[in-house]
Image: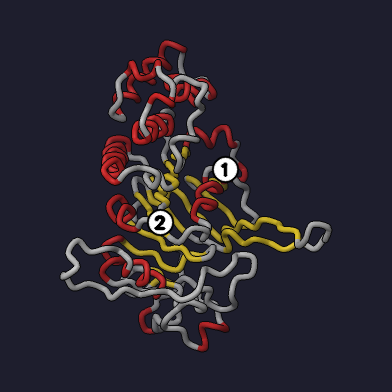
Amino acid sequence: MNEPLLEISGLKKYYPKKDGLFQGKKSWIKAVDGMDLTIGKGETLGLVGESGCGKSTTGRMIVGLEDPTEGTVSFKGNDLSRVDKRELGKQMQMIFQDPFSSLNPRMKVSDVIAEPLRLHKDGSRAEQQRRVDELLERVGLRSEHGRRYPSEFSGGQRQRIGIARAIALSPSLIVCDEPVSALDVSIQAQVLNLLKDLQKELGVSYLFIAHGIQAVKYISDRIAVMYLGKVVEVASKDELFRNPKHPYTESLLSAVPRPDPKLRGRDRIILKGDLPSPENPPSGCRFHTRCPKVMDVCKQVEPSLQVTRDGTYAACHLVSEAEMKQPQEA
């Protein structure tokens, strides 16, 4: 991995929930419940998992849209809780999932893209307009498109506008929160290729959040697998697909369709039961209620995320102690 740009340590996000309309008793929704990750300079880290596992909440905490309940997010060695959020916007941006709701329908496209430049007083009006025209061209649109409103564009074009807005201030890190899930398959490929081209050109790092593991494999350098608020495995994309360590990762990969059904591949692993509630997660390993390889120790002792001999990270009792190195941050 390249030099660390972002470091997450012990990150948690709990949301309060009152039990009953007139009762004062309060419980907690543990959306993210202890996360340790790093993202290197110029790297794309994919973050995958089922809906509700805490992926988007993690991304929102990184860019400052949510405050952590506990833990730290360090960016370029600085604790983000001590950094002015206005200044943070120059270094981090976010591409949202829905291109139809993430753009103000009452603003022209040029104003949408220029908004961060104006907020940070980056250049004169004429310089800002030239920058907007340049950004539109960079994402595959034309400068005259800036005079139109978002409603006049397709979903793929709107996402390109969102990308132009995200790179306007030349950030070092962009959190991509399922940026292609609302698009047609052919358009998804175009947007993914655009993101890869911009990364080569700008040297930006991505946290790419998605539940479609094939898209994550295409764009990512490393992949982190998340289950019920916790990271259960981290590995390079090649190693993850070749030799997954965690049973949950195996089940995700087994669901990837093969282009030719006659080709030999992993047998489909059908998980039993539903995803447990983050309000009352299972004891021990959180995956043990659905795991086809569950052991007694899994029900009692929560496994920690540890690095293995081949450099991957796994939180599973099935990974023998002989394969483990000393614990360290993923």
The one nearer the camera, 146 or 164, is 146
- Residue at left offset 39%, top offset 78%: 324
The one nearer the camera, 184 or 321, is 184
Q: Which residue is mark 1?
A: 64
- Residue at left offset 55%, top offset 83%: 299
Element class at badge 2? loop
Can residue 87 be seen here?
Answer: yes
Q: Which residue is mark 2?
A: 211
Element class at badge 1? loop
Calculate the distance from the C-alpha at mark 2 to the C-alpha at mark 1: 22 Å
**Can you give x and y, in whole percent of width and height, for residue 101 in the image?**
50, 35
User: Where on the picture, by quarter, is residue 266?
Assistant: bottom left
Q: Which quadrant would the N terminus be assigned to in this image?
A: bottom left
Label 2 CA crowd tier, 10 Å (few <14, some 14–19, many 20+): some
- Residue at left offset 38%, top offset 53%: 45
Please name the amino acid that badge 1 sits on.
Gly
Query: Which residue appears farthest toward the bottom when viewing the image?
Result: 296
The one nearer the camera, 148 or 232, is 148
User: Where on the picture, by quarter, is residue 33?
Assistant: bottom right
Q: Earlier in the sequence, mark 2 or mark 1?
A: 1
Residue 289 vertical placement versus 119 (above, below): below
The one nearer the camera, 228 or 132, is 228
- Residue at left offset 30%, top offset 25%: 141
